[in-house]
Image (cartoon, rainbow, N blue to C red):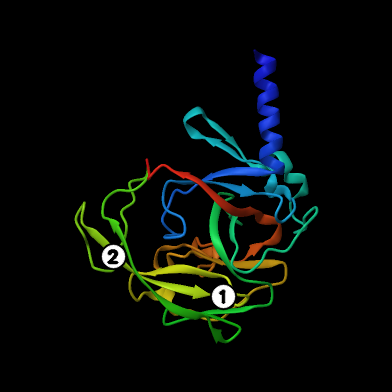
Amino acid sequence: TVKTIVYALLIAGIFRSLFFQPFWIPSGSMKDTLLIGDFLFVNKMAYGYSYASCPSVRMPQFGINIDATDICGVFDGDNTRLFGSEPDRGDVVVFRHPTTGFDFIKRLVGLPGDRIQVKAGVLNINGEPVKLEDGGIFEELAGPQGPQGLRPRCENGPVGDGGKCLKSRQIETLPGGVSHPILNIGRQGSDDTGVYTVPAGHFFFMGDNRDNSTDSRVPQVARGVGYVPFENLIGRADRIMFSSAGR
């Protein structure tokens, strides 16, 4: 029995490190592309392998906190990848947070050398605003969502449990042709930013739920994401397998 368990864990570890990693959506930063409770697999072959490809196992209820650097830390620091392949603008990517080490999932909007700025809520890339089209209204029920009991922010103001929580939806088309929905809640500080010049070997990420996302618009020193090194990419989110509806 012990041998069977060891072999099963070994096979699962190799499969998770080299091919596909399961990922469960815990927050609403990627609505409505990804909803709280969506379960997907991350394609780890898409961008090659780095230290971040090694799995992190965090089970605080059992006192288990094994970080990827505990297993593959010897490969950390050179910002390179084995069999590396550059991601494409518009990819939905799972990456390792540069300071906390936790897994994040966002959309890649800025490549190395790009100048990124948000003006009046519109993403500008290299001085040009992206194409936007009306996408109607995104509607969800107000109330606690997911194990953290997160309540959605609504454009139509505070809404009681069970009420209709509404957000404006637009279809954004990035340079290169990738189109996807983005949501708007209202004007706030992140709708007007300075110019971010993405360094070589780094990438700029944003959530599709633009007014409810901690992403590269917030520098790491302010508890944000900042620029993400190439070696911190884990894989590309390709397919939603099922949704637990937040439970």
Q: Mark 2 belongs to which amino acid?
A: Leu
Residue placed most toward the observer, 50 or 208: 208
Q: Which residue is mark 1?
A: 174
Q: Secondary structure at mark 2?
A: strand
Does 30 appear above or below 54? below
Q: Mark 1 belongs to which amino acid?
A: Leu
Quadrant, the N terminus: top right
User: Measured from the top left, where is residue 167 in percent x and y?
Assistant: 32, 67
Is any part of residue 68 visible from this angle? yes
Q: Which residue is mark 2?
A: 166
Is any part of residue 122 visible from this angle? no
**Residue appearing at x 66%, y 55% in the figure:** 232
Q: Residue furthest bottom?
A: 127
Crowd around label 2: few <14 · some 14–19 · many ≥20 (10 Å): many
**Residue appearing at x 43%, y 78% in the figure:** 133
**Residue appearing at x 58%, y 55% in the figure:** 97
Q: Is residue 209 left or right of residue 10?
A: left
Q: Is residue 47 left or right of residue 41?
A: right
